[in-house]
Image: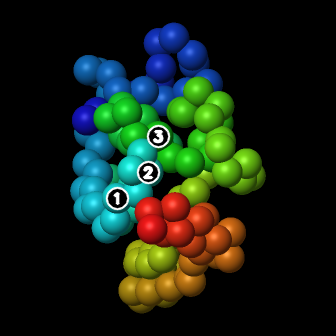
Amino acid sequence: MPIGRSKIDRKKMAITEEGKNAVTHIKVLKRYGKHTLISVKIDTGRTHQIRVHMAEIKHPIIGDEVYSNGKNEFEIKGQMLHSTILEFIHPITNKKMHLEAPLPQYFKQIINILDNNMN
């Protein structure tokens, strides 16, 4: 879905016909009733791309006060988004960079709460 500046709120991005191409691949890892743990791969890097696409399909990111109408039932600071793997070509050395980061503790705690609520 193409992403451009919102015509309603100029501080936000939105799906717009005249927006730039934005490709997001979403894989469901686990469903928790009204929540879903997903894996996302983006082919493009538009501003707020994952947040905009997820809100557009009515599955906003937990903690996203901008694109989820302020819903934050877990009262976390920031969005429940985490980049596990990041790869890019270094602009100076031209070498491929591969970075990995484990899930933050608060993220694990919320997944644990969701797992326990399913039992």
Relative to 77, is 112 on the left or the right? left
> Tag 2, which secondary structure?
strand
Mark 1: few/some/many CA within 10 Å (<14, 14-19, 20+)? few
Relative to 104, is 101 on the left or the right? left
Q: At 34% across and 59% down in the image, what residue appears?
A: 31
The quarter of the rendered structure image containing the C terminus is bottom left
> Are circles 1 and 3 on residues that touch, CB within 8 Å?
no
Q: Alpha-carbon distance for marks 1 and 3?
A: 14 Å
> Tag 1, which secondary structure?
strand
Residue 8 image position (x, y, % from top left) = 51, 11
The three-letter code of the residue at mark 1 reads Arg
> Are circles 1 and 2 on residues that touch, CB within 8 Å?
yes
Q: Which residue is mark 1?
A: 31
Going from the N terminus, do you reach mark 3 or mark 2 first?
2
Q: At 44% across and 63% down in the image, what residue appears?
A: 118
The three-letter code of the residue at mark 3 reads Pro
Q: Nearer the viewer, residue 106 or 52?
A: 106
Q: Alpha-carbon distance for marks 3 and 2?
A: 10 Å
The quarter of the rendered structure image containing the N terminus is top left
User: Where 74 falls versus 59 (above or below)?
Assistant: below
Residue 35 circle label: 2
Residue 83 image position (x, y, % from top left) = 50, 69
The three-letter code of the residue at mark 2 reads His
Q: Alpha-carbon distance for marks 1 and 2?
A: 6 Å
Residue 60 circle label: 3
